[in-house]
């Protein structure tokens, strides 16, 4: 094709907006309209000092970013580079002084102005630090945010920032809604798909440095040589991006693939098996991160099978990994249907007495709340309760309980809410974020995990806006104190446009979105009232079956008098697991925040809330509010057409439409169901349900993904 013709097609393609399927995530590098001199300057005159696989990635990244962001602008050519990227040692060889570098962590970075040479310097102790610094600078260039005079000096506040893939070896993804697993095990190790590089690059661009490739409901096969070859191929691909690989270890693996009779953690043969297995893994992957373990939970094998403690199990694996500097992320999500106690209390009861009994390379992975990634949960009572054992945060990025892939919910405000909660462990000001970054209890290991929402969909995450949740997780794992609003703004600018109206409007939509979902699904502290098994759609009627703790009626306890789970001292007393300041505040109807009302209290339908109206009226109005918010988002988005390419615009629009319909489905089903007990009419302004309760109860969609 002639060059002019090619150009014509490129222009046509871009104008018609068909080209953007979202694959490029927040690394769009779209053309900057009227760039300022500094933007063009840095992208046209730069030097990257040294050679390594990571430095090659940096060089490629800047060239690529430059071709996108300033392609239509004349380059400014200088004889000396305006931007220099180099490790501390390499810079001093060039007589560039490097203030502040010593205090950085090995993967921290500095971006600063060198006043003598009038250059911008990106510096770090390691190549990976440089990679992070480069990405940060490119993000500044794209968003038009100049580097402050005093520079940027940053180290991650959390050491291990990992995605947890709940991906099965057959490529289905448990609780995954964006297609199949991106790990094509069958083609590995011989075929290294470009997407593996793109995945690692995207993660590096937000500081994620670890990936757990396999489902917590683990398959022991992953630990066999056949699969370790494949894991090695992925680890080799990810290494230059600073990403370590971890695997989930099935507790009964010594029986299943080792031919032993037992998996008892105190049995010498079992211990030797794990030691040997670790040796073997490190031969394939010398920088293997370690194991993530789900034990004694939801049917998974564990130390309980041998009357051993969680510490016995974790320490056995920790001993095997220690010589290789690997760690064990042992999950606290342990509960049992045969334990006659509120599920809320079980992990605390199990782990608190073991504080200080774990080896140094064990970290306990705790979900943000005590039940299970609900749209809203108070923080998990274990945070603040284990000063002598490192605890890490597990967030769920995939939206198992927040409408799957079609419901827009920006999760950063939810993560932020938990991180900012005060545990009062060492008095006022003992926020969860301080537990996670280790500062509250001086933990030697720190980590944060996010259950991935990534799949084979072209845009990776199903909903275009759910890319923002992956992005936000990376940002918060790097700095758990960052404000979610700032993250939303940055993501919008990188992904779509820096237009002020667009950014302001959509930041508001994003910031309100999680609360909106809470409103139309589980207002006022309700929880776990979704449909059984696939968890898609409402199911407040779910009861019976094999486990009470998997039903909805166990959690909402609705009856003719009222609704809610009494977790005060007159009920399950889960509240006693929190600090006395919180017990006082949350334990009284007068002071409990309404967002946690039905989480901790059983409340009469006629009980007046803060606004003087009855609980029933408040509940109904919250549901209605959520529906109205979802509908309003469609109108708001319609007005954003001029800022977004057609392809992504229409995709989002159609998902917003689904969301608004399903918000009404949640409202109608829940109000009809709870109305049987309250026997009160819907207050003015709340729409009458479209169908009968029977209709909703019988509505059973087939083949919902993610199970
Ligand atoms: C629940 C999910 C289940 C997971 C489990 C876990 O429904 O699929 O296996 O958590 O975290 O949220 O282990």
Image: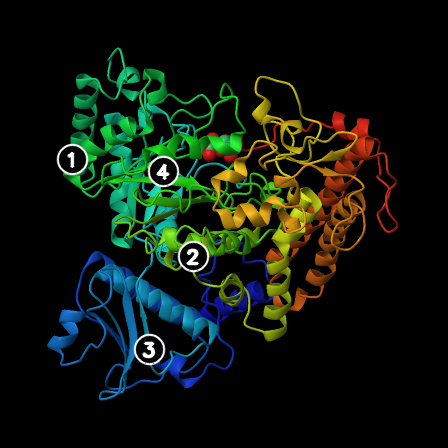
Of circles 2 and 4, the one toward us is 2
Q: Give the distance between the C-alpha atoms of the residues marked 3 and 2, in whole angstroms.
A: 21 Å
SS for dot 3: loop
* Residue at 76% in and 35% down: 669
Q: Are marks 2 and 4 in contact (CB under 8 Å)?
A: no
SS for dot 2: helix
Q: Earlier in the sequence, mark 2 or mark 4?
A: 4
Q: Give the distance between the C-alpha atoms of the residues marked 2 and 4, in whole angstroms.
A: 21 Å
Q: Position of residue 428 (x, y in %)?
A: 45, 58
Q: Position of residue 484 (x, y in %)?
A: 51, 61
**Circle 2 residue:** 476
* Residue at 36% in and 30% down: 186
The local crowd at label 3, few if under 14, some if 14 to 19, many if 20 or more residues have their Cα within 10 Å, is some
**For this rendering, which residue is in front, 636 or 157?**
157
Q: Is residue 37 above or below residue 4?
A: below
Q: Is mark 3 within 8 Å of ligand 1?
A: no
Q: Earlier in the sequence, mark 1 or mark 4?
A: 4
Q: Earlier in the sequence, mark 4 or mark 3?
A: 3
Picture quadrant where residue 513 is located: bottom right
Task: Single out the residue that lies furthest toward the left.
Answer: 93
* Residue at 47% in and 52% down: 470
**Circle 1 residue:** 283
Q: Give the distance between the C-alpha atoms of the residues marked 2 and 1, in whole angstroms.
A: 33 Å
Residue 462 in view in this figure: no
**Circle 4 residue:** 213
Q: Earlier in the sequence, mark 2 or mark 1?
A: 1
Q: Are marks 1 and 4 in contact (CB under 8 Å)?
A: no
Q: Earlier in the sequence, mark 3 or mark 1?
A: 3
Q: Give the distance between the C-alpha atoms of the residues marked 3 and 1, in whole angstroms.
A: 42 Å
**Circle 3 residue:** 151
Of circles 2 and 1, the one toward us is 2
Q: Earlier in the sequence, mark 3 or mark 2?
A: 3
């Amino acid at each position: 094709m002639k060059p002019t013709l090619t150009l014509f097609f490129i222009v046509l393609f871009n104008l018609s907006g068909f080209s953007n399927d979202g694959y490029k995530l927040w690394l769009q590098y779209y053309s900057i309209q009227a760039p300022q001199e500094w933007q063009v300057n840095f992208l046209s005159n730069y030097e990257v000092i040294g050679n390594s696989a990571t430095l090659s990635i940096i060089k490629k990244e800047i060239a690529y970013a430059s071709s996108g962001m300033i392609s239509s602008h004349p380059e400014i050519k200088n004889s000396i580079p305006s931007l220099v990227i180099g490790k501390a040692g390499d810079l001093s060889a060039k007589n560039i002084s490097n203030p502040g570098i010593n205090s950085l962590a090995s993967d921290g970075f500095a971006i600063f102005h060198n006043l003598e040479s009038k250059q911008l310097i990106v510096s770090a102790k390691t190549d990976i630090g440089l990679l992070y610094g480069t990405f940060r600078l490119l993000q500044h260039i794209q968003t038009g945010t100049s580097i402050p005079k005093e520079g940027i000096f940053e180290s991650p506040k959390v050491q291990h920032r990992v995605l947890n893939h709940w991906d099965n070896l057959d490529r289905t993804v448990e609780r995954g809604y964006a297609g199949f697993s991106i790990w094509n095990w069958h083609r590995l190790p011989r075929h290294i798909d470009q997407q593996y590089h793109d995945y690692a690059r995207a993660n590096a661009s937000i500081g994620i440095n670890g990936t757990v490739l396999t489902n917590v409901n683990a398959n022991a096969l992953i630990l066999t040589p056949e699969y370790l070859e494949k894991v090695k191929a992925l680890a080799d691909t990810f290494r230059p991006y600073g990403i370590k690989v971890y695997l989930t270890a099935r507790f009964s693996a010594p029986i299943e693939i080792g031919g032993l009779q037992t998996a008892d953690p105190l049995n010498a043969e079992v211990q030797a098996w794990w030691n040997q297995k670790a040796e073997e893994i490190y031969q394939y992957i010398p920088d293997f991160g370690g194991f993530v373990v789900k034990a004694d939970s939801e049917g998974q094998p564990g130390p309980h099978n041998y009357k051993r403690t969680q510490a016995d199990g974790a320490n056995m694996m920790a001993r095997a990994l220690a010589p290789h500097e690997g760690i064990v992320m042992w999950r606290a999500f342990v509960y049992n249907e045969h334990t006659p106690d509120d599920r809320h209390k079980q992990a605390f009861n199990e782990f608190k007495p073991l504080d200080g009994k774990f080896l140094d390379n064990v970290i306990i992975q705790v979900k943000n709340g005590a039940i299970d990634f609900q749209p809203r949960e108070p923080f998990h009572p274990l945070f603040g309760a284990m000063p002598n054992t490192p605890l890490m945060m597990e967030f769920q990025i995939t939206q198992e309980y927040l409408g799957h892939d079609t419901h827009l919910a920006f999760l950063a405000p939810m993560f932020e809410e938990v991180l900012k909660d005060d545990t009062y462990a060492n008095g006022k000001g003992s926020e969860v974020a301080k537990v996670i970054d280790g500062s509250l209890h001086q933990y030697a290991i720190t980590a944060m995990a996010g259950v991935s929402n990534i799949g084979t969909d072209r845009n990776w995450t199903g909903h275009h806006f759910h890319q923002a949740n992956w992005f936000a997780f990376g940002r918060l794992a790097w700095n758990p104190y960052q404000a979610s609003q700032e993250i939303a703004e940055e993501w919008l600018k990188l992904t779509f446009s820096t237009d002020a109206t667009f950014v302001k409007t959509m930041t508001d939509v994003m910031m309100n979105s999680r609360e909106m979902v809470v409103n139309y699904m589980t207002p006022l502290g309700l929880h776990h009232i979704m449909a059984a098994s696939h968890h898609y759609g409402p199911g407040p009627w779910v009861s019976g079956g094999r486990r009470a703790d998997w039903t909805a009626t166990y959690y909402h306890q609705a009856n003719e008098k009222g609704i809610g789970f009494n977790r005060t001292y007159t009920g399950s007393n889960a509240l006693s697991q929190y600090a006395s300041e919180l017990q006082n505040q949350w334990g009284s109807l007068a002071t409990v925040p309404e967002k946690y009302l039905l989480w901790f209290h059983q409340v009469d339908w006629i009980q007046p809330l803060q606004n003087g109206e009855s609980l029933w009226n408040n509940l109904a109005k919250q549901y209605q509010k959520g529906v109205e918010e979802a509908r309003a988002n469609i109108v708001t988005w319609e007005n954003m057409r001029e800022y977004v390419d057609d392809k992504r615009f229409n995709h989002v629009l159609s998902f917003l439409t689904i969301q608004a319909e399903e918000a009404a489905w949640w409202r109608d089903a829940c109000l009809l169901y709870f109305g049987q007990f309250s026997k009160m009419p819907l207050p003015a302004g709340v729409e009458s349900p479209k169908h009968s309760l029977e209709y909703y109860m019988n509505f059973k969609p087939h083949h919902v993904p993610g199970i």
